[in-house]
Image (cartoon, rainbow, N blue to C red):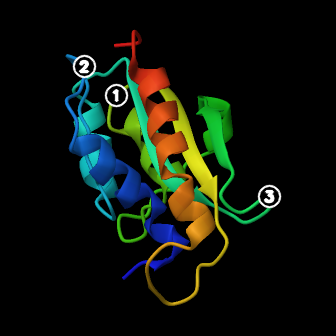
Amino acid sequence: MFLGDDGFGPEVVRTLAAEPQPDGVRVVDYGIRGMHLAYDLLDGYDLLVLVDALPANGRPGEVVVLEVGPDDLGDGDYDPHGMNPVAVLGGVSRLGGTLPRTYVVGCRTASVADGIGLTPQVAAAIPDAVNAVRELTTGRV
């Protein structure tokens, strides 16, 4: 179950998946299947865009685009039972792959209380996040 605004990523992915994509672009909701993402990255990609909720240390509903590099990942502590994004991305090199140019399109949360459904501020940010993903993927694959 999602905790309120933690469902932001899947909602953006659902919106993107309903539209035609440029050649070479895949839209996938990996959810809690982080190891699946790590293994898929071994196929070699030019670009990875993750969409996720971000901590509320900003204006709720604010869309932020962050570039992630190897130095941001530290050791990428590996735990196959608790694969957070840092562990997944850090583990790609351990599996013999190379992390592609990577971005996070995130949204500052208003609430991560128990329950399903986005707050109005975060729901209103979905179109901005979709546009940010489009901008990153257009001409970069």
For mark 2, what is the residue? 22
* Above/below status of 113 relative to 130: below
Tag 1 and tag 3, C-beta contact below 8 Å: no
For mark 3, what is the residue? 58
Res. 33 image quadrant? bottom left
Query: Mark 1 and mark 2: span between their CA atoms?
Result: 24 Å
Residue 100 can be seen in this image: no
Q: Where in the figure is residue 8, as x and y percent of width and height? A: 47, 61
Residue 125 shown left or right of residue 74 in the figure: left
Q: Residue at x 23, y 27 (%)?
A: 21
Assess disc 3: are there few (<14), some (14-19) or many (≥20) residues with their C-alpha within 10 Å of its C-alpha: some
For mark 1, what is the residue? 97
Query: Element at badge 1?
Result: loop
Q: Where in the figure is residue 116, as x and y percent of width and height? A: 41, 82
Q: Residue furthest right?
A: 58
Query: Mark 1 and mark 3: span between their CA atoms?
Result: 34 Å
Q: Residue at x 62, y 36 (%)?
A: 65
Res. 97 image quadrant? top left
Give the quadrant of the C terminus: top left
Query: Element at badge 3?
Result: loop
- Relative depth, front residue between 20 and 137: 20
Residue type beneath disc 3: Gly
Q: Nearer the viewer, mark 1 or mark 3?
A: 3
Query: Mark 2 and mark 3: span between their CA atoms?
Result: 32 Å
Query: Element at badge 2?
Result: loop
Res. 74 image quadrant? top right
- Relative depth, front residue between 34 and 133: 133
Give the quadrant of the N terminus: bottom left
* Above/below status of 16 relative to 139: below
Q: Where in the figure is residue 106, as x and y percent of width and height? A: 58, 49
